[in-house]
Amino acid sequence: MARKLLLEHDDVPGIETFEVYRKLGGYRSVEKALKTMSPEQIVEEVQKSGLRGRGGAGFPTGMKWSFLAKPEGVPRYLLCNADESEPGTFKDRYLMEKIPHKLIEGMIVSSFALGANLSFIYIRGEYMWVLEILEKAIAEAYANGFLGKNILGSGYDLDLRVAPGGGAYICGEETALIESLEGKRGNPRMKPPFPAVKGLWGCPTVVNNVETIAAVVPIINDGGEEYAKIGLGKSTGTKLISASGNLVRPGVYEIEMGMTVEEFIYGDDWCRGIANGKKMKACIPGGSSVPILPAHLITKTAAGEDRLMTYESLSDGGFATGSMLGSGGFIVFDEDQCIVRNTWTFARFYAHESCGQCSPCREGTGWMEKVLNRLEHGQGNMRDIDLLAEINKKIEGNTICPLGDAAAWPVAAAIRHFREEFEWHVTNREESQTRNYGLLKAPVVG
Amino acid sequence: MSNTHVDLSKRHSEKPTFSAEKIAEVQALIASYPEGKSKSALIRILHIAEEEFGGWLSIETMDYVAEILKIQPIEVYEVATFYTMFNLDPVGKHVFEVCHTGPCMISGSDNIMDYIQQKLEIKVGETTKDGMFTLKTAECLGACGYAPMLQCGKKFHEHLTKERVDEIIAAYRSGEMPK
Amino acid sequence: MVKVTIDDVQIEVEPGTTILNAARQIGGDVVPPAMCFYSKLPGTGGKCRTCLVEVAAGSEKDPRPMPKLMASCSTQVMDGMIVKNKTSERVQEGRGGVVEFLLINHPLDCPVCDQAGECNLQDLGFQHGGAKTRYEEERRTYDPIDIGNKIKLHMNRCILCYRCVHVANQLTDSRVHGVLNRGEHAEISTYIENAIENDFSGNMIDVCPVGALTDKTFRFKSRVWFLKPMDVSCECTKCSGKAVAWMFGDEIYRVTARKDKYGEVEDQDGKTGWICNDCRFEKKDPAKWSIEGPRKINRHSVISQGHYQSPRGNSQKKIN
């Protein structure tokens, strides 16, 4: 088993309480940061750590922090993005449910580093019971002097609140999150200005994912350089992976970046292979919006090298033969799964979640859903397959926010790698309603 | 599709009013935001209002919330119709929201959905005659590793099998919270 | 001042100017179309994506091209920026895509639409639309409804530019309509049956780029190209009283604000010349106005002063 930095002690009874968490070394980073470090030093450590945003985009966290505008007399805000809604992703929920104080600890240190005195955790509304866990933990942190006025006698004040969403994937986009937190519809804002300049209530704001904030704790405890030693190249540290689909042991795992995909899927300490003795057909390694790969391209790159659990290796080959680490939502499909049906559910998801503000996304996602619905239900034509690719191209890159791309990519990738299965749905309309296509007829390596 | 206009037959006959305890909770929530930013409390107040006033948001409820926050009613309607958790029509006592997005679908959510429909003798979108259950589909709820699943109120029911569904329905029918 | 080049034409503009406004300063066909942006309504823009342009060089300092097409209405120019609009194939292709999206659910009911002849979507479809549709699905439909006794809402035609929402926010004291639902189900609505009663609500009609919001007092009265637009004015306590009367013979068929070549309400006395509902809906008697003279309609559309004489005979038929 690899070392755990985020999920450390997740199996200890009572770890969700302040008492147990503190006894096992919790809140050390707050003591260290507030008593011995300046905000600038914390930002520097985070920069040294090479930590990249864990929400999906992988943007260097230290750099994001350094962009924060600091005009005199204007409050700054840190918002934690706990709107985890990308299909295949449930890691943040696990962390918050099991070890809520880890997130709170990270929020205190990060807020101090950014000069925020009021910070929010914006959590998806469906995780209401997790919100209650967090609020209980926050109350404990207040009671023990880690939140509120003059924390640990440092002179630093911080209030931390949790705010729920109401059911909208789009609020994971940082400007939509801000709109939602202001009590509005989750319509993403036009950028620039970026939140670092004009965010919550028009003030400079940083939005970071739950896992990103939690990772600040070990970075401060052990130092950025130590953290950077874990992992491989620019994929430093550990990463939470949400494993789902047809696996023997799905669940949330903390991995050291750099392990092989093969080991992760088949290893005894990890997912233990495909359930029911079946073969793997395909895998989506980074949440529903990243390209799906057929089995032979997920464990090996097109060049025949081992595919590794890193940002770089998973995207090796570009969109032609690679994918992305994204949010770490690792979805595995066995030989019995229908790629067309799965693609339709994703298209339906994105059409359902489009805010409807800009025309390519509003109209394009709905159109793709309808075409895929027909294809899946034996009503498709060959021209529909090319039409989907065309619609894709017209959405991609032309929308206000990345939801358009997120909706386009999975459809494009499914057609790229599984075109024969789409065509089979057209040429065998009736049969496709009674059985699934099975494994690709194309050569499968390994 | 037709225009979104409220079905005026579905209204609260009396103006909804929070209990003194709830009003205190709502006022504390509003006060937790900086001055002039009270609209930020809207979504959470709508959750509270839905829970308090029958599991759905009537025009009267939304107008009441607008009044509390001193905003225009349309600002509440816009938000309530944007977020899918809010029910804008009356619902049964327990609302089953069965996830059917990719990871749940490949883990058998279609069969679970069929089974629930059969068991409750209703289709998606309907409410049982006794007003006990409303059945809906949901898009990804963040339980992919524990699929298939359904949400009922604040509770996630995961690793669903037909047997689990039987247990859950039986528990709700007898007024208990399923394990 | 900063220098920007749009379709090989160089111009110097104030810092902070958007690409679209810089292009408008050049004029002619380097100007990208804009369906949602409205310079007189702060906060509009960015949504329709018809004004997308290619930024071939970001600035003098950082001449790298921007990877994505940019919304020209909400992207500010930088010194040394090079922009391609009509000269970019990517732009033409992307805009064609946007037009296709805007039209898939549009009813294409131009023959019975009061906006025909002055509709931005019609122009856009003419310039960038495909010859036939690839959309085989059922179109979404809504019933036309009255919002207030003078304004008709045809949601089928709406492109969700949000301009009317901004009008209500910025010109009236309480907004009763807005955008409800989301995604492809998003719609302009009052939710409950609610009349929009406000002295300036009629301006929603003037800012609507399509036939979604139309003037009920003008409904099916005439095709706009058979009317003679005249600059008129009156003493009005609520607004500038400077308007355009659309006349047929001696009759006023409708009254609108005075609009420029981009369809935006012109400034009057240093302020945007929004007109009040009394002037728009209630003053159809020519005696209530002093007529200043024919309005110059400087645009490519069929409503072009001087090309049409007042028609007589059967061309005035009502379409019901």
Image (cartoon, coloured by chain):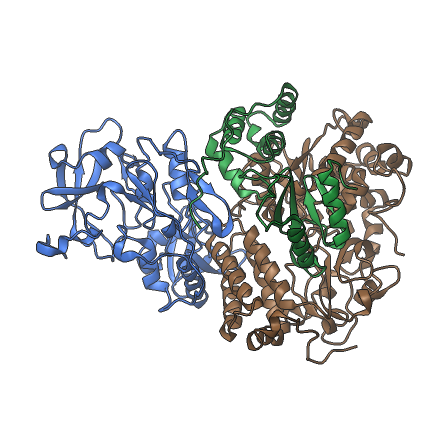
Chain colours: A brown, B green, C blue
Q: Residue at x 82, y 51 (%)?
A: A227
* Residue A47 in view, yes or no: no
Residue A393 appears at what percent x and percent y? 52, 65
Q: Residue at x 44, y 46 (%)?
A: C187
Which quarter of the picture shows residue C135? Answer: bottom left
Vertical comparison of A200 with A292: above or below:
above
* Residue C183 in view, yes or no: yes
Vertical comparison of A324 with C21: above or below:
below
Looking at this view, is A322 or A360 the one in front? Answer: A360
Would you say A125 lies left or right of A13 here?
left
Looking at this view, is C136 or A168 the one in front? Answer: C136
Residue A246 appears at what percent x and percent y? 76, 62
Residue C320 appears at what percent x and percent y? 22, 51
Vertical comparison of C285 with A432: above or below:
above
Would you say C97 lies left or right of A301 here?
left
Specify the quadrant that holds the C terminus of chain B. top right
Q: Residue at x 23, y 36 (%)?
A: C281
Vertical comparison of A123 with A290: above or below:
above
Looking at this view, is C17 or C304 the one in front? Answer: C304
Residue that sits furthest to the top in the current view: B20
Would you say B131 lies left or right of C108 here?
right
Q: Residue at x 27, y 45 (%)?
A: C259
